[in-house]
Image (cartoon, helix red, strand yellow):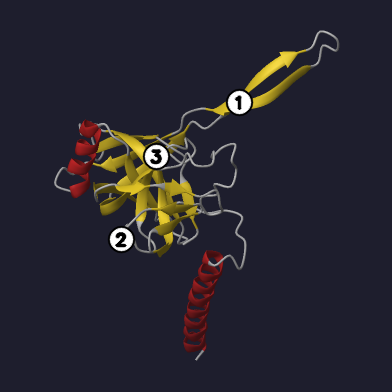
Amino acid sequence: MKKLLSCAMALFASVLYGAFAALTNHMQRHGLILSAAYFPNGTIFSLATAYEAPLTLSAISNADPGVATSAAHGLSDGDIIVVSSGWTGLNDRTIRVADPATGTFSLEGVNTTSTSRFPAGAGEGTAKKVQTWVSLSQVTDSASSGGEQQFAQWVYLDDGRQRQRPTFKNAKSLQLTLDYDPALAWYDALINADLDGDPVAVRAALPNGAYLYYNMYVGFDGEPSMTINQNMSVVASFSHAAQFIRYAS
């Protein structure tokens, strides 16, 4: 009887824990509770492998979010686009489409209200929709570098106190280590992206339901490591072409 009761209690605890974990994950995804830390375990990286023909953007408004004008754009809510723009702060960014309407759509999560950063009337350009993605499977390690804040420093003769102000941030990069398998679709996709030399859209689907979108130059030669008694692996390097963007879901 005691053994049966113990088994029943263990089963109940297991079910209760599973339900609690599912509820907690749901609440985190919807911003109902805060979490002090996240693990990247379960993150899936994907690489854009094809785009539709570029659309002309005749104007982009100074708004939050910015609204692009494009005749007969044909875009849908949630489409992912790479924008080329006269605004340096927007150029080459990978962005999600929101609120599509006849001749216009919003650049979700992009605030273009600052006319000093986004001069009025100068944002026109093009947008190309990502058509297909390939998942980067068998990733065994990821490492980010760069982004460190740099400063200008000076001293006035009359007080001798050093001052500083922020200037630029170092260029950023991401390095992925993957178990070698040239039969997988991502292998040729990385080779082609390296040879093309153009930045490509990269997506990171996080385990908490959020998404990170980048536009990155790819460095990949496909040659595997050959260390005895270890899986053969390859390294893909990604250099940021523009600011990344995060979407909560």
Q: Which of 156 and 66 is in front in this view?
A: 66
Q: How many labels were placed on the picture?
A: 3
Percent of width and height locating residue 73: 32, 57
Q: Mark 1 Cα within 10 Å, few/some/many (few <14, many 20+)? A: few
Observer-nearest residue: 240 or 140?
240
Mark yes or no: residue 32 visible.
yes
Residue farthest to the bottom? Answer: 1
Q: Where is residue 203 in the image (x, y as percent from the top left)?
A: 37, 50
Q: Quadrant of residue 76?
A: bottom left
| Mark nearer the N terminus (2 vs 3) | 2
The picture places residue 179, in percent across and down from the top left corner, at: 25, 43
Cα separation between marks 1 and 3: 22 Å
Residue type indicated by callout 2: Gly
Identify residue for label 3.
92
Left or right placement of residue 1 versus residue 175 in this view? right
Task: Give the answer, above or below, for where 208 lies relative to 83.
Answer: below
Residue visible at 51% across and 70% down in the picture: 26
The numbered mark, 1 or 2, whose residue comes first in the sequence reads 2
Which residue has dot 1 on it? 167
**Which quarter of the figure has residue 33?**
bottom right
Q: Which amino acid does label 1 sit on?
A: Thr
| Residue at image mark 2 | 74
Q: Nearer the viewer, mark 1 or mark 2?
A: 2
Taking 87 as reference, is 33 above or below it?
Answer: below
Q: Which residue is drawn at 20% across and 36% down?
A: 191
Q: Are marks 2 and 3 in contact (CB under 8 Å)?
A: no
**Label 2 to label 3, Cα distance in Å?**
21 Å
Report the side of 60 relative to 164 (left or right): left
Q: Which mark is residue 188?
A: none
Secondary structure under the numbered disc 2 in the rendered image: loop
Q: Which residue lies furthest to the left in this view?
A: 183
**Relative to 192, 206 lies left or right:** right
